[in-house]
Image (cartoon, coloured by chain):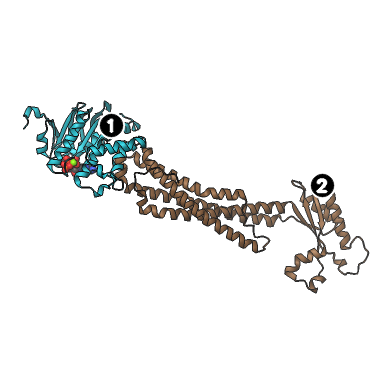
């Protein structure tokens, strides 16, 4: 599904953020991505959702070496990935409904198919009362749910969530994670970047830990769960 | 007007608000310059047609027959000289028509300068013969001049050529300038559209990157800018054209009231109006293509 081989990353001439990162994610797996602020969690996710290119090393997505992919193959690869951005990146001039519909429109789905799909999903995340609201009028937790709905509306094979619980209290954070677990059960591969150690501890999923640019993978079951 | 759904809040851009007015101005100026160009070339080719197949033969009053005593010397009376010149002219192949101007016609021509008083009546005037040539007559002017001079000493031919050449030179220079203005104004339009589109891209860089990351094809993003540019272009262009058309009609009305012989007619033909009315759409098309190319170039830089 996702394979990194000796991937290094630096921004411009800056310091190297990731050193020789190597890992492979099986389809249908669920991983947390942890590490101190500035460790490079968002940078790693950006590499996966093809918003930046590595300084060196090999990245394989859905079996395709992305360095060899033609430019016009990339949109199709990107559409298989749903992203919940750390800062949401909702469009303030569009309604909640249109924000969530955006990936479908980008993919050229018929308007007649869009409405029901979006309404159903927003109902599922508990936002059916806010279909026509503007994102600016929503609470942090509501925005977060809109961002998650937008990331999954297109039934992505891979979901990347950057601090999806950053703006909500633990109770709602846990509910959001259960929501994401539902998707995982339906076959979506999941990576969730988070600072929240307590939250990570509540779930029995392996943890990719970034520190000083080096990635290590800890398997929970080996440590035992609370 | 047809307009696809847009994911970008383009209407809110400050730059977008003044672009339509720039396009109004650009189309207005371009339409006037183009109309001027068309009026001039119509007029110039009209003069060409009117003048190059016309000659004027001038027969000076013979000095010895200046007195008006009506001596019956048939060889030197002005009337006989004109008759002889007419014979020569009518015998020349390629001449369609030769007609002597009557004294009244001559005086009428001179009236603006001399008035209609006794003074003009007493003048001894050269006789003038208006000659029309057949189209592509191939008449040799030197040959004709020699023959005429032999038959009627002192007769000269004026084919207006030198005067006409100078006029044409003037018209061509003005045409060149008007063409240059049309070109510059179009370049200004293109530069403006590029500038506004770039600004739009900078303001909406986040949204564009988001669409890109969601897997939008470049064409999908470009479309949102290009239809916006097309619509702005058409709207501004039509207003600019309407203003230019009113200006032209007003000038045409004013010029029709001034009876000046050489002032070219400001009337445009139907086909010229058609060309002019295409202008706003051409400008709109230019803005659309520019917007598209600019967006695609910017997107090509994203990973
Ligand atoms: N666009 C950029 N240009 C230059 N440097 C950047 C850029 N984005 C991130 N960095 C740098 O890369 C390093 C890692 O940033 P990143 O956002 O990946 O960290 P993070 O682990 O997501 O942190 P946080 O937990 O606070 O979100 C930081 O030192 C940051 O300054
Ligand atoms: Mg981050």
Residue A95 seen in this snapshot: yes
User: Which residue sits furthest front?
Assistant: A129
Q: Is A73 on the left or on the right of A128, as rendered?
A: right
Instruction: Give the chain letter for brown.
Output: B
Residue B22: x, y in percent? 44, 55
Q: CA distance from mark 1 to mark 2?
A: 87 Å
In terms of image quarters, where does ligand 1 lie? Answer: top left
> Which of the 4 quarters of the picture holds residue A87?
top left
Q: Nearer the viewer, residue A222 or B162?
A: A222
Circle 2 crowding by C-alpha within 10 Å: few under 14, some 14–19, many from 20: few
Q: Position of residue B156 (x, y in %)?
A: 79, 58
The x, y position of residue A140, in whole percent, is 19, 46
Q: Single out the residue that lies furthest toward the bottom.
A: B118
Residue denoted by label 2? B93
Q: Residue at x 77, y 66 (%)?
A: B108
Q: How many marks?
A: 2
Q: Chain of mark 1?
A: A
**Is A171 left or right of B8, judged from the image as shown?**
left
């Amino acid at each position: 599904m996702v394979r990194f081989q000796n991937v290094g990353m630096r921004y411009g001439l800056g310091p190297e953020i990731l050193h020789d990162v190597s890992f492979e994610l099986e389809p249908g797996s669920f991983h947390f991505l942890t590490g101190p602020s500035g460790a490079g969690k968002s940078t790693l996710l950006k590499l996966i959702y093809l918003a930046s290119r590595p300084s060196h090393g090999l990245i394989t997505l859905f079996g395709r070496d992305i360095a060899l992919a033609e430019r016009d193959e990339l949109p199709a690869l990107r559409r298989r990935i749903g992203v919940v951005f750390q800062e949401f990146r909702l469009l303030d001039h569009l309604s909640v409904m249109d924000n969530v519909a955006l990936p479908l429109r980008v993919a050229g789905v018929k308007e007649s198919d869009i409405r029901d799909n979006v309404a159903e999903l927003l109902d599922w995340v508990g936002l059916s009362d806010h279909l026509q609201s503007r994102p600016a009028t929503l609470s942090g937790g509501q925005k977060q749910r809109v961002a998650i709905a937008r990331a999954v509306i297109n039934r992505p094979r891979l979901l990347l969530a950057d601090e999806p619980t950053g703006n909500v209290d633990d109770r709602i954070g846990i509910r959001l994670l259960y929501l994401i677990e539902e998707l995982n059960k339906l076959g979506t591969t999941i990576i969730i970047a988070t600072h929240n150690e307590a939250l990570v501890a509540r779930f029995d999923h392996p943890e990719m830990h970034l520190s000083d640019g080096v990635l290590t993978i800890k398997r929970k079951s080996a440590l035992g769960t609370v | 007007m047809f307009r696809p759904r847009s994911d970008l809040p383009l209407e809110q851009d400050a730059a977008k608000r003044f672009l339509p007015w720039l396009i109004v101005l650009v189309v207005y100026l371009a339409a006037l310059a183009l109309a001027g160009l068309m009026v001039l070339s119509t007029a110039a080719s009209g003069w060409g047609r009117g003048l190059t197949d016309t000659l004027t033969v001038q027969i000076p009053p013979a000095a010895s027959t200046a007195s008006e005593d009506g001596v019956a010397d048939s060889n030197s009376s002005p009337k006989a000289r004109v008759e002889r010149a007419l014979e020569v002219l009518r015998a020349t192949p390629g001449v369609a028509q030769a007609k002597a101007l009557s004294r009244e016609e001559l005086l009428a021509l001179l009236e603006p300068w001399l008035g209609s008083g006794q003074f003009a009546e007493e003048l001894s005037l050269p006789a003038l013969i208006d000659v029309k040539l057949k189209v592509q007559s191939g008449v040799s002017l030197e040959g004709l001049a020699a023959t005429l001079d032999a038959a009627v000493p002192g007769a000269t031919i004026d084919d207006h050529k030198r005067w006409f050449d100078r006029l044409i030179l003037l018209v061509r220079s003005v045409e060149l300038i008007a063409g240059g203005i049309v070109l510059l104004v179009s370049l200004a339009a293109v530069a403006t559209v590029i500038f506004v589109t770039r600004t739009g891209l900078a303001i909406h860089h986040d949204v564009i990157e988001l669409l890109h990351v969601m897997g939008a094809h470049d064409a999908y993003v470009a479309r949102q800018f290009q239809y916006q540019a097309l619509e702005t272009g058409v709207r501004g262009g039509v207003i600019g054209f309407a203003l230019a058309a009113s200006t032209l009609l007003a000038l045409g009305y004013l010029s029709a009231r001034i009876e000046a012989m050489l002032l070219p007619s400001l009337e445009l033909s139907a086909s010229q109006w058609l060309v002019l009315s295409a202008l706003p759409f051409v400008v709109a098309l230019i803005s659309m293509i520019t917007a598209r190319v600019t967006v695609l170039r910017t997107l090509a830089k994203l990973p």
